[in-house]
Image (cartoon, helix red, strand yellow):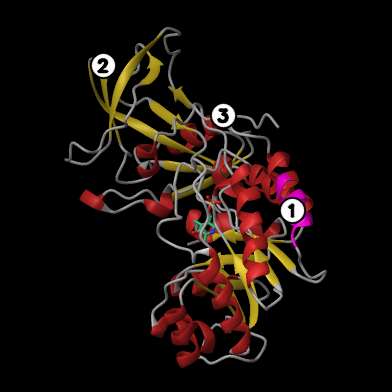
């Protein structure tokens, strides 16, 4: 895929030029640059982009050009993507459960030297396949408490405090550089999640005989959606910095974070087209199985209707929105207010679509959204911070 897409001044000119009958992502490079700079200027350490959030080459290139040089990867394909695009970027294998084949390839072909584990069997596997030494780093992922993130992960990954402490000691005994990691979930709405997790790091360190060289505070930083009330970005940075000052870290401990959503969520909108209207029901050419899979989680994206010839009615009505597949699950979980006279051939643009959209799309029923263009226009939902 090209890393330079067609460029347009705004979304309207995308529609005028392409009159797209297929869905089109409109990337805002300036918005990605803004969010990258926000992290690079304010986070007290390394900023890793979690590529699963949006691995589109244009997105990766824009973040790289904005100064992102570290990438959180969780599969061999993600590692290969970064290694083959950027010779001087670092990839970190941050999945606590890895196949032997992918560990071996990551090490031997792609020179990966940062790993995450959350269980002794995974440490044994790592030692068995690649051995310790050569400055390799192993981070022990710790379990965190639930603080109302939109997506929780604490049940799936993370070692409890005491187990994490003894695992950390084993990592050091095996000859790796030891570190600790956590990830408090996605779209985290409460800065206490980070304070509490860092306090747990402090407890693990009190129970272990080892100092750490690395501490990874994960991702989870939230993005504005229509129905989401979230703390300011700097509140998260302040909470992290304050909490780090309260625990016993070596002065040279490298701090890392792994944002996905907060780097790219506001950086793209998606143009869809109305294929059919039946009274208060619209059939669009993208939906739950494709770019909008995350909307089942309840986020409401800002929307804007477009028509090329003539004005649209200023009064709105609520519509049920179906996606393109022959499947009744393919419906948005909320109604959308759109112009009362919207009809076949008009376009509906969804904002805040940069995160977990194309990366989670299936090709079900022969529909797949892959067109990416860039625009200069600001996001539909401006950042209020
Ligand atoms: C998904 C994931 C991230 C990114 O999460 P966001 O909510 O997109 O910031 C970071 N770290 C790990 C371990 C993840 O699984």
**Helix, strand or loop status at disc 1:** loop
Looking at the picture, tell me which residue is in the foreground, 67 or 46: 46
Residue corresponding to mark 3: 229
**Helix, strand or loop status at disc 3:** loop
**147, above or below 359, in the image:** above
Identify the mark nearer the N-term, 3 or 1.
1
Q: Residue at x 63, y 92 (%)?
A: 133
Does the magenta run of residues contain 246?
Answer: yes
Q: Main secondary structure of the magenta part?
A: helix
**295, above or below 373, in the image:** above
Which numbered mark, 3 or 2, is in the foreground of this view? Answer: 3
Based on the displayed image, in which of its 4 quarters is residue 162 positioned? bottom right
> In the shown orientation, is residue 33 left or right of residue 161?
right
Please provide percent x and percent y for residue 262. 59, 46
Q: Is residue 343 visible?
A: no
Residue corresponding to mark 2: 280
Identify the mark nearer the N-term, 3 or 2.
3
> In the shown orientation, is residue 217 left or right of residue 147?
right
| Whether label 2 touches label 1, CB < 8 Å | no
Based on the displayed image, in which of its 4 quarters is residue 207 positioned? bottom right
Marks 3/1: CA–CA distance: 22 Å
| Whether label 3 touches label 1, CB < 8 Å | no
**277, above or below 21, in the image:** above
| Whether label 3 touches label 2, CB < 8 Å | no
Which numbered mark, 2 or 1, is in the foreground of this view? Answer: 1
Please provide percent x and percent y for residue 59. 56, 54
């Amino acid at each position: 895929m090209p890393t330079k897409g067609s460029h347009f001044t705004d979304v309207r000119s995308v529609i005028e030029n392409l009159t797209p009958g297929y869905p089109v992502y409109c990337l805002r490079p300036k918005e990605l640059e803004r969010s990258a700079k926000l992290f690079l200027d304010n986070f007290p350490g390394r900023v890793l982009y979690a590529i699963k959030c949006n691995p589109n080459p244009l997105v990766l290139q824009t973040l790289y050009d904005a100064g992102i040089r570290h990438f959180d990867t969780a599969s061999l394909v993600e590692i290969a993507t970064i290694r083959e695009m950027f010779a001087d970027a670092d990839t970190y294998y941050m999945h606590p459960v890895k196949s032997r084949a992918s560990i071996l390839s990551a090490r031997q072909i792609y020179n990966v030297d940062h790993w995450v584990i959350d269980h002794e069997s995974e440490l044994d596997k790592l030692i068995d396949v690649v051995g310790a030494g050569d400055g390799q780093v192993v981070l022990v992922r710790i379990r965190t408490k639930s603080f109302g993130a939109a997506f929780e992960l604490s049940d799936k990954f993370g070692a409890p405090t005491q187990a994490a402490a003894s695992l950390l000691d084993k990592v050091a005994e095996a000859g790796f550089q030891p570190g600790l990691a956590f990830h408090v979930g996605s779209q985290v709405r409460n800065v206490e999640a980070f304070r509490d997790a860092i306090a747990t790091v402090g407890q693990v360190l009190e129970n272990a005989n080892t100092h750490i060289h690395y501490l990874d505070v994960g991702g989870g930083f939230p993005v504005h959606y229509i129905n989401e009330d979230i703390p300011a970005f700097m509140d998260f940075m302040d909470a992290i910095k304050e909490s780090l000052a309260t625990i016993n870290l070596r002065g040279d401990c490298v701090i890392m974070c792994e944002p996905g959503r907060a780097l790219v969520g506001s950086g793209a909108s998606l143009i869809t087209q109305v294929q059919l209207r039946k009274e208060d029901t619209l059939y669009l050419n993208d939906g739950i199985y494709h770019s909008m899979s995350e909307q089942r989680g309840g986020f409401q994206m800002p929307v804007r209707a477009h028509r090329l010839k003539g004005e649209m009615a200023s009064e709105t009505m609520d519509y049920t929105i179906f996606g393109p597949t022959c499947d009744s699950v393919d419906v948005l979980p909320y109604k959308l207010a759109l112009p009362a006279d919207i009809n076949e051939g008009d376009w509906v643009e969804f904002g805040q679509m940069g995160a977990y959209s194309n990366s989670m799309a299936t090709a079900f029923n022969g529909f797949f959204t892959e067109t990416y263009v860039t625009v200069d226009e600001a996001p539909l939902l401006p950042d209020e911070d």
